[in-house]
Amino acid sequence: MSRQSEAILEQKFIDQLIGLGYDFVTIKDEAGMLANLKAQLESFNNDRYSEKEFSTILNHLSKGTVFDKAKSLRERFALKRENEDTAYVRFFDSEDWTNNHFQVTNQITIEGTYKNRYDVTLLVNGLPLVQVELKRRGLELKEAFNQINRYQRHSFWSSHGLFQFVQVFVISNGVNTKYLANNKDQSFKQTFYWADEKNVNISGLTEFTDAFLNPDHLGKMIAQYIVRNQTEKILMVLRPYQYYAVEAIIKQVDASKKNGYIWHTTGSGKTLTSFKASQIITNKPEIHKVVFVVDRKDLDYQTATEFNSFKPGAVDMTENTKSLVDQFSDNTKLIVTTIQKLNNAIKNPRYRKSMEHLQDKTMVFIFDECHRSQFGETHERITEFFSDIQLFGFTGTPIFADNASKNEYGKRTTADLFDEQLHSYVITDAIRDTNVLKFGVEYVGRYKSKSNNFVDIEVEDIDRKEVLESPERLSKIADYIIARHDQKTHSKRYSAIFAVSGIDQLIAYYDIFNEKKKAGDHDLRIATIFTYNANEEDKDADGFISDVDIDFKKVADPGVGYKTSHSRDKLESYIADYNAMYGTNFTTKDSESLEKYYQDIGKRLKKRERKSFVEEDRLDILLVVNMFLTGFDAKMLNTLYVDKNLRYHGLIQAYSRTNRIINEMKSQGNIVCFRNLKDKTDEAIALFSNKNAKEEIFTPDYEVFVEEFNKKYVELLGIASTPKKVDELLTEEDELAFIKAFRELMRILNTLKTYADFSWDDLSMDEQTFEDYKSKYLDLYDKVKMNQDVNAVSILEDVDFELELIHRDEINVAYIIKLLAKLKNSKESDKEAQRKAILEMIGGDVELRSKRELIEKFIQDHLPNIEDAELVTDEFEKYWEEQRLLALKEICEEENLDQQQFRNLIDMYMFTGKEPLKEDVFACLENRPSILQARQIGNRIIERMKEYVDVFITGMVG
C-alpha cells in the first residue's frame, strides 16, 4: 500500500476546513496577501481605505516583535485619515469571536533570508493567525516543528512581518497532530495534543480539525486562551486540561452558586489556569471582585513573578493588611492576596469594620494549593463573613478520607470544603502527555536486591533515632551522594534537593559535607535554609509537609525564632558560606534580609533554565527539612535525596519537585531514598492515580534499559555495521535512518547513566565504539549545518540531532590544553596515537568541534617549536588571541564593519545572551544598507557573530 503524499493530505485538510466554514482564497505571495488583507479589513470594519491610509495601517502592523503584535492584534488602531478625521481600525473581535472572518490558503511563498513556501495558512480578517505545517505519514512530527523554527529564522519577519501575527502553530503528519504558541524559544517538549474533557488525546488531523480548528473554538482560543507573558515577553497557549478547567469554573459561576475544585497534578501549570479563570470571571459585570488566595509561603518570588507576568502589578508583596482592605474598597476587580492577610482583614477589629459593607457582595474566591490552606478556622471565618461568595480550589494532591488529618473541625476532605470536583488531570495523564516526567526511584540500603556499595546503611524497619542519626550512617550517605551526584545530575548540569527529617539532622549533614569539602573530597555547592518550630520529623507522617507559614519577622526574633540559639548561630554561619560563594550579604539578624535570602535561593535554582545563566551562580544541593518541598518549580532541578519519612500528598509533592519538563537530557526525576519508603510510595501512587499506575509513573528497572539498548544497537548495525560504514551510506534516506537509530541509542544511554548500577560492561557496545559512531553522527550534523547556508532542500534539515545529549561539561579547552602538554612530553612513538585521540575527542564534543581546525593547526605548526611543556598554556593562549584578532579583522573587513562597535556588540551579546537588534547591527556598518538588503545583511552578520563567539569565546574558560 502506498503512503499518502503530503499534497493529498494537504488538499483533504483544506476541503475539511472549507466544510467547517472557512473561505478558500488563493494567495501566492506577499502582494496577494496584502491585497487580501486590505479587502478583509475593509469588510471587517465596514469601511474603505485609500492606498495611503492602508500604507499607514501596514506601517502600524509591521512594528514590534511577535509579543508586541499579539497586543496590536487585540487593540484598535487610531488611523488618521487623509481628510484629517480619525477612524478606529479593529483587527480581531475578542468579545464575540464569531464576528471574525476565517479564510484558508496554501503554499504562500515569502522571501526572507531564503525563499520559503508555507503549507496551510489560516487567516482571520486577513491576518495569518494560524500556520499549519504538514508532513506525510511516517515522518517524525518533530520535522514539522523544526521546519517552523527555520521559517522563524529565515522569513516570518520579512517585509511587513505579517507572519509574526501567528498566534498558534499546528504540526501534523496526519496520524499525530499537536499545537503550540508562537514562541521561538520553546522546545518540542512545549507542543501539545488537544484532548477531550476526559483527557483522551485527539491526535488524528481530521479529528483535531473538527475539535480545535472549527471557527468557533479557534476563535475562542485566540480571544481568551492565548496569554501574553509580560516577564518573558512570550506568548503562551493553554493546554486542553487547563482550558476545560477554566470552562468548568466559568460554567459553575454562570449557572449556580455551588463551589468546586480542580484536581490538576503538581507541575501541570495550575497558576496559569487559575489566573486565566480569574481574568475571565473578572470581566463579568455581576461579579464584584475576584480574589485569588495563596498561602504566604507560596507568595514567593516565583508565584509573584508568574502572576505579575500575566497581569503587571497584580500581586501586592507587602505584609500590609490595609493595602488589601483598600483594594476591596477601590476599583480593583482582581485581588491577589495571602490567606493570612485575608484572615486578618476580616478578623482584626481594626480592619473588619471597613470590610463589613462587602459582606453581601457577589464575589468569587479562588484558592491555590487548597490542600494546605483551607483546613482550619480561616475557612470557617471566610464562609461566615461573606454571604454571597463562591469558592473554587486548585490542588495537585486532594485530601481524601485516607489522607485527611484530624483537627478541631474533624477529618475534612477537599470535597467537604469545596463540594464537587469540576475537572481532574492526574499524574498518569500528565506523564502520558509528557507534560511531566516519570520518576526513577532508587532505595539505598541493605534490603535492595541489586548491588549496593555499602550494605551497612541499615534502613529497613529501623525507627530508632540513635541509628538513623548516627554520625557513621550520615557520613556514609554523604559519601554516597558525593560519589553519585555528577552521575545523577549530568555533571552538575542540574540541581538537587536533599530533604532530611529535622534541624538537628540537617545541621549534622551540612557540617559533614563541609568537612569533606575542606578535605578535598568534593567541590559541591551546598546551601541550606530552615526556620523555627514545625521542623521536627512528623512521627505520624500524615502526609502534611509543615512549615508552610514562614513569618520571617518571627524567625528573626532571637527569642522565638529557632529551636536553640545554637541552631540560629549555625544558620548564620551557613548563610555566611552562601555569601562567600555568591558575593551576597544576607543575615538571620534582620527579617527582611532573611526573607531575601530565602527568595535568592529560589531564584538561583529557578534561573538555571534561563539562557543568560552563568556557571558561577550554580547551586548543586539545597539541604532542607520542609521548605521548597511544595509549590516550588525549577525545571533544572532533577534529583531529590530523601532521608525522612514521607507519606500521601507530602510524598507526591516532594517527589514532584524533580519532574518538570525542559529538554531531552532530563529524562526523568531522580529520587534517591535512604529510608524504606517503597510501601509509602506505592500507597501514595495508588491514592492519587490508581493502584496499577506504578508502571506509568516510574521508570523501568536498569535491566530493562540495558536490554533495550542492546536491541537498538543491533538495529544500528543493520544500517552501518561499523563507524566507517557511515561514510559509505549512499542516500540521505540512509543517513536519516542512521541518525534516528543512533539518536535512540543516545536517549537510552542518557537514562542508563543515571542508574547507580550503570556499567559499560553490561552493554553489547563498548564505549570507544559509541564514541566512534558519535563522531560520524556529528559529521552529519556539520554537513546539514553547512548546507543550510545554501538554498538547497534536504530531508536532514528537519531532523533534531538532540545535541544536548552529547554535551559533556568535563571536556573543555582547559582540559585539552592539559592533554597538549602531556603530548609534548610523550615519547615520539606515542605522539601520533595521542594526537589522534585528542582530535577524536574534540570531534566528539559539540562545543569543541568548532575549534578543531584551529587546535589542529596549533598542534601541527606551534607545538613542535615549544621547548618546555609548562609553556604550552601560555603559548596556546597567545596563539588563540592572535587567531581571534585575525578572525575579527576578517569579518569586519568583509562586512564593512566598524571594529570597535562590532566588539561592543559581541560583548553585549555575551552579557545578555540575546541576539542584537538589527538596528544595533546596522550601527556597526560604515554604510547603512538599503531596505531590500537590510534584513539579509543583518541576519548574515548576526550569524557570523555567533559563529565567532562559538569558536573563540564559548568554552574557553574552565
Image: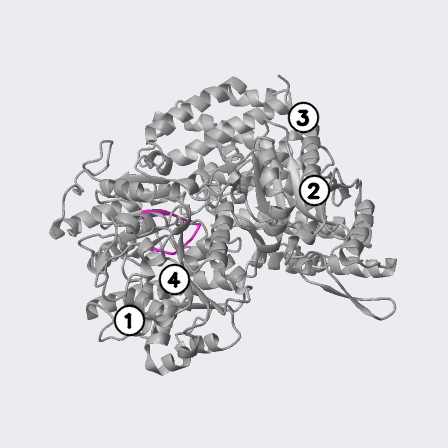
Task: Pinpoint residue 62: horizontal percent, then vertical percent.
Answer: 74, 57
Mark 4 sits on what residue? 298
Q: Residues within 10 Å of mark 3 (few under 14, many from 20)?
A: few
Badge 1 or badge 4: first in the primary sequence: 4
Q: Label 2's element?
A: loop
Badge 3 or badge 2: first in the primary sequence: 3
Q: Which amino acid does label 4 sit on?
A: Asp
Badge 2 or badge 1: first in the primary sequence: 2
Quick check: marks 2 and 1 in contact, CB under 8 Å? no
Side of 320 relative to 893 (left or right): left
Query: In this orientation, does residue 882 appear?
Result: no
Estimate the spatial distance between the alpha carbons at disc 2 and disc 1, rounded to whole Å.
63 Å
Mark 2 sits on what residue? 21
Badge 1 or badge 3: first in the primary sequence: 3
Mark 3 sits on what residue? 5
Badge 3 or badge 4: first in the primary sequence: 3
Q: Which amino acid does label 1 sit on?
A: Val
Q: How crowded is mark 1: few (under 14 residues within 10 Å), some or many (20 or more)?
A: many
**Is residue 934 covered in magenta?**
no
Q: Which residue is drawn at 80% across and 56% down?
A: 42
Q: Label 3's element?
A: loop
> Residue 555 — which label?
1
Question: Range of the magenta residues?
Answer: 629-640
Q: What residue type is labelled 2?
A: Gly
Q: What residue type is labelled 3?
A: Ser
Label 3 or label 2, whichever lies nearer to me, is 2
